[in-house]
Image (cartoon, grey):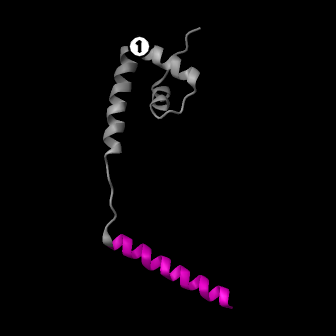
Amino acid sequence: MTKTFTYDDVIRYLYAETTLNENDQIVEALALDDDLMNFYLDSLEIKEQMNKIVRTPSDRSVQKIIHYSRQQTAKQSRALSC
């Protein structure tokens, strides 16, 4: 019996969330189904582009986090000394 694979299965394969047995079956399905192969190639390209995205927080955000952390540390110190 031949299993039909969905786009979700291809995404799981792309992110290495499939078993070795599924991998073999998906590779075979990709070779036989042009639509599935095109989806895989498009998804692979999108994944590679997403991996290149670098997000950097603003200095203001970093300062807020540091300030919050210092406040929490001071509160914990006071609570321990009581």
Which element carries disc 1, helix, strand or loop? helix
The residue at the far top in this view is 1
User: In the shown orientation, is residue 74 left or right of residue 61?
Assistant: right
Q: Main secondary structure of the magenta part?
A: helix
Q: Position of residue 72 (x, y in %)?
A: 54, 79
Closer to us: 2 or 17? 17
- Taking the spot 49% from the left edge, 81% from the top edge, the residue there is 70
Q: What residue range appears in magenta? A: 60-82
Depth check: give the residue in front, 4 or 67: 67
Question: Circle 1: is it few (<14), some (14-19), or many (20+) Cα within 10 Å?
Answer: few
Kind of residue sitting beneath label 1: Ala
Considering the image in quadrants, where does the N terminus appear? top right
Q: Is residue 67 magenta?
A: yes
Judged from this view, the residue extending furthest toward the right is 82
Give the x, y percent position of residue 53: 31, 48
- Percent across and percent down for residue 9 are 50, 26
Q: How many numbered markers are drawn?
A: 1
Q: Which residue extends farthest front?
A: 20
Residue in the picture at 57% in, 84% down: 75
Q: Which residue is mark 1?
A: 31
Residue 74 located left or right of residue 40: right
Q: Is residue 62 above or below residue 12?
A: below
In this view, the residue in front, 6 or 52, is: 52
- Residue 19 part of the magenta segment: no
Identify the residue at image location x=43%, y=79%: 67
Left or right side of 25 for 82: right
**Which quarter of the rendered picture does the C terminus lie within?**
bottom right
The relative height of residue 39 versus residue 33 in the rendered view (above or below) is below
Indicate the quadrant where residue 81 lies: bottom right
Task: Say whether residue 18 is left or right of residue 56.
Answer: right
Q: Residue at x 33, y 38 (%)?
A: 48
